[in-house]
Amino acid sequence: MFISEIGKNYKGSETRAFKMLKKLISTDIDAITFQVVEPTYYDKIKKWGGPLSKNFYKNAIDFVHKNNKLIGFAITDKKMISFLNSAGADFWKSLSTSILDDALLSKLQKTNKPIFVSTGISSEKEIIKMSKKLKNIKFIHTQLSRKIEDTNLKAIDRLRRLTNKKIAFGLHCSEHNILYLSVAFEPSDIFFYVKDNSQEKFPDDEHAIIIDNVDNLVKTLKKLKKSLGSGIKEKLTTD
C-alpha cells in the first residue's frame, strides 16, 4: 500500500483535516492515517492545535470507506483504541517511541487488525525482540532524521531477514526523491506525510509531500514498481 499520513498536520482544524481528506480521496493513494496521541500531549504543542473529535473520526472513517480507501491511526492514546476499532479503523501504526510499550501493543493486538510498528529510534536488538513477541505486525523502517545519509534503505532487506517480518518504509528525509529509490528495496508498504499548500510550518514539515503533488507521486511510484519484475531472466522475442 501507499499510505498518506496527515498525522497532526491538520493543526487543530477539523475543517482543514476534512479538506485534506477530500483531496487525498481523489488521488491514487491506498490509505490515509491520522495521529491520535494523549490529550496531555497537546498541552506541549499548543501552536499546532488540539485533537480531533470522536465525531470527526467517525465521519472520516465512513467517508474514506465510501470512497474505497483504507484508514488507519498512528496511536498512543490507549483510551481511543476501543472507540476507533468499533468505528471501523482498518489498521494501526505505533509510533517510534512506542515500540517497547507492551500495554499499548497488547491492546492493539487484541483488535486483530494489522499493526505497523515504527522503528525510528530502535536498535536491531529491540526490533528482533519485538518481532518474537508480536503477531500480525509489519515493521516500518524509518529514521527520525532529515539527512539523506541517515536514511539507510539497505536496512529494509536486513530487517526482513532478521525478523522474518514484512518491512515497510516511512519517509522522514527532506529529500523526497528517496521515495522513488525506496521502491527498488521492495518495502511491503510506503508511508509519507502530507501537508496542504499553505505557506506555513507544520508538525511534520520538511519531509511532508505537498498534497497537490500526491497523485502524480503515487502514480509514478506504482509505475516504477512494475519495473522490478520477477527477477527471473527470460528470453524475449523482438518485434
Image: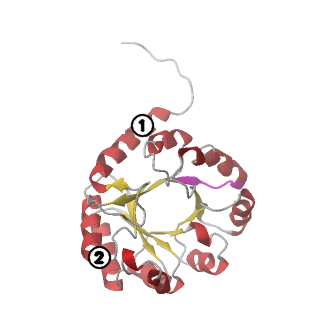
Residue 123, located in which quarter of the rendered image?
Answer: bottom right
Residue 32 point in image, percent of width and height: 38, 63
User: Rounded to the nearest whole Å, what is the CA distance between mark 1 and mark 2?
Assistant: 35 Å
Residue 209 point in image, percent of width and height: 36, 53
Q: Residue at position x 67%, y 51% from top?
A: 159
Tell whether position 5 is magenta: no
**From the image, which quarter does the N terminus lie in?**
bottom left
Circle 1 sits in a helix, a strand or a loop, which is it?
A: helix
Query: Which of 236/210 is in front?
Result: 210
Give the vertical position of 182 relative to 137 (above or below): above
Residue behind mark 2: 13
Is 7 placed left or right of 213 in the picture?
Answer: right
Residue 198 point in image, percent of width and height: 26, 61
Q: Which residues are magenta?
A: 163-169
Q: How is the image coloured?
A: secondary structure
Residue behind mark 1: 224
Q: Amino acid at mark 2?
A: Ser
